[in-house]
Amino acid sequence: MLKIMSIAGARPNFMKLASIARAIRSHNEKGSTPAVEHIIVHTGQHYDKKMSDSFFIDLNIPQPDINLEVGSGSHASQTADIMQRFEPVLLEQLPDALLVVGDVNSTIACTLVASKIEYPEGHSRRRPIIVHVEAGLRSFDRGMPEEINRILTDAISDILFTTEEQCLTHLQNEGIAKEKVYFTGNVMIDTLMQHVEQAAQSTIKEQLHITGEYTLVTLHRPSNVDRQETLQPLVKCIEEIASTKHIVFPVHPRTFNKMKEFSLLDALEKNPNITLAGPLGYLDFLNLIKDASVVITDSGGIQEETTVLKVPCVTLRENTERPVTVDIGTNYLIGVDPDKIKETVFNIFSGKGKKGAIPPQWDGKTGERILKVILSVH
């Protein structure tokens, strides 16, 4: 019996974990050896039901075996709280492998604990094998908290699974041995492909009274929403784009609070060309992405999803840790200049958007490849 413990902390983690949970379930149903016991730990980093619990339901992931119920806080307090609550769980469960995904505080916090843990004397392992899924992504912007989490997690992981071929170069440049790195593809795309037909049955457009073409907007990155001098021009830009094509804007709680604080919310709520919504479940949101004329976002994962769905994506960031979506896919890395944003969006509206292609190994089989490697090296 091989015991794998997976960590889920925030919305993107759940989508990535779904593919691996499905691969483990299939492995066990076939009676393959060794059997795998899969323990899911939910740190509670995201605690809004729409942004956590619903994802386990939508994506058919077993409910977490353990919930640390950490909640929000500063980076320091949240990371420390996760570490303190996770250490006794790790010592109680003694997994053979700890699987972490992505780049959130839960990822680095649990990795740090596992890297320093000492299993009881007589156990076959000193500590678990640490497996990082989505390793080697780099924005080269150390002002992003996620970039620090990525670099540190990769540095102390034992097995690293990458989504893009150039990730190996990044890791080797940081002194990580090539033998630890496996190019397996993108678990996020596994989940998308598994659920896109189901998402097509969502009634979210009817619920939001959306008819005809629309642009989908998401904003949540602190660098874009936390300061009025940055957020206000972006909101004004959204209003101007809405005069040409209807805007659907599921508003992240952080963004909602900031727009309210800066008195930007009222105008959006009164604009008949803008539909605001709260956080959405995975299937509802995927339904909106796949049918959008354009997606305007500052998210990382949405850059990948739009590339596979062949939907133009305008990313409001100065850099991206997913350059393959720009080089091969449908993504435009624009920054936050309103004039450049509008120029790009209006060019796409006029039919001048790039077609894009699907990157290598984004084929829906990444979870299976990851489990195969773990079983071969455990």
Image (tube, rainbow, N blue to C red):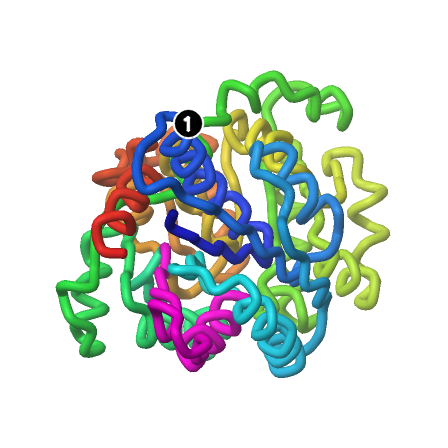
Any magenta on residue 46? no
Crowding around mark 1 (Cα neighbors within 10 Å: few <14, some 14 to 19, many 20+) is few
x%, y% of residue 163? 29, 50
- Residue under pointer 1: 29
Any magenta on residue 117? yes
Residue toward you, 54 or 282: 54
Please state, as top left, top right, bottom left or bottom right, where the C terminus lies in the image: bottom left
**346 versus 238 height, above or below:** above
Q: Is residue 354 visible?
A: yes
Question: How many numbered discs sit on the rendered protein?
Answer: 1
Farthest front residue in view: 122
Residue toward you, 78 or 94: 94
x%, y% of residue 162? 28, 54
**Element assignment for label 1:** helix
**207 versus 136 height, above or below:** above
Q: Determine the residue positioned at 57% across, 67% down.
A: 92
Magenta region: 106-133
* Three-letter amino acid code at the position of disc 1: Glu
* Horizontal side, residue 370 vs residue 204: left or right: left
Q: Determine the residue positioned at 67% across, 73% down.
A: 227
Task: Report which quarter residue 178 is drawn in.
Answer: bottom left
x%, y% of residue 303? 43, 46
**83 versus 309 height, above or below:** below
Q: Determine the residue positioned at 77% across, 24% down.
A: 207
x%, y% of residue 170? 22, 68
